[in-house]
Image (tube, rainbow, N blue to C red):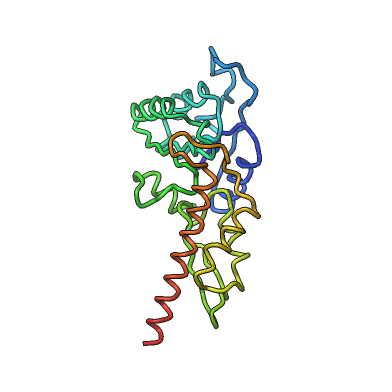
Amino acid sequence: MVLVVHSGGLYAERVIAYLSTRGPVAARQLPRDLPMIIDDPEEYFPPDLGGDAAAPGPSVVIAINLHQDLLLEIPHRVKDTARALIAPREDASWVKPGLQRQLAQACAGYGIETAFPKPFCALDPEASTPAIRAFCEAYGVGLPRFRFTVENGLIAAVEVLQAAPCSLTAFLAEKLVGLPADETLPERAGYLHHAYPCLATMTLDPETGDTVMHQSLAIVRKSAEEAVARSADAGEQQGE
């Protein structure tokens, strides 16, 4: 089971809603307005976070935009069942480098795999550890990948092979039908990326010198470009 621990907001809602269409998901919302330092994180957690007699604990935990003291407490509360913890960074401030190292170290002590994709749609199953790869495969999420059916130069159908966990890929799949399958498609996909819209931040990321939204946009454009190339290759092979 996947457990999403979050502090509210539209982004968390989108992730929970989309993952729930792919498999079992539980969600727990923690407070957002908190003091800078929390002396006793336990008081903010529900007692069943790590599972109880009525329900098994989570095998994968997704932590979205949590206070750093609460985030660091999670490995200790799910250590008996969790195989992986994923903390996406649609905003670089959600998990800063020092906190990332602390969290990874705490998880490693319990044999829990970790991933800190920035943004969430940058999570690459092929480059991930076993439990995280298994989660991506089971829920069909990770770096967006499409398969286009092309008729008379236009996209007649779109199959989503791998989707962004925020559901933006599913939106794109619907809107791309009927568009030309040519070199203009990545740019058109970029317009749709803004129309949904992507919820990654436009604040400058000090680690990359760019914004996380621009990173997400680049991922979408590359995914569309690769799908067009695959459809062209398939068409050439059929014509041989």
* Residue at image location 40% in from the left, 36% down from the top: 114
Marks counted in the figure total: 0
Above or below — where is 220 with respect to 102?
A: below
Q: Nearer the viewer, residue 79 or 145?
A: 145
Q: x and y percent of residue 171 in the render?
A: 61, 58
Percent x, y for residue 92? 50, 34
Image quarter of residue 185 = bottom right
The image shows residue 224 at horizontal and vertical percentages of: 49, 63
Instruction: Establish if 17 lies above or below 59.
Output: below
Is residue 34 at least partly visible in the picture? yes
State the residue in front, 146 or 1.
146
Q: Position of residue 168 (x, y in %)?
A: 58, 54
In the image, what residue occupies the spot 62% across and 20% down?
A: 34
Q: Residue at x 57, y 58 (%)?
A: 190
Give the side of residue 110 with respect to residue 175, left or right: left
Q: Is residue 175 above or below residue 17?
A: below
Res 7 quadrant in image: top right
- Image quarter hosting the C terminus: bottom left
Residue furthest top in the image:
39
- x 48%, y 56%: residue: 144
Tell me: 83 left or right of 150: left
Asked if residue 118 is positioned above or below residue 21 in the image, the reply reads above
Q: For the view shown, which residue lies furthest in the front direction?
A: 209
Q: Is residue 59 visible?
A: no
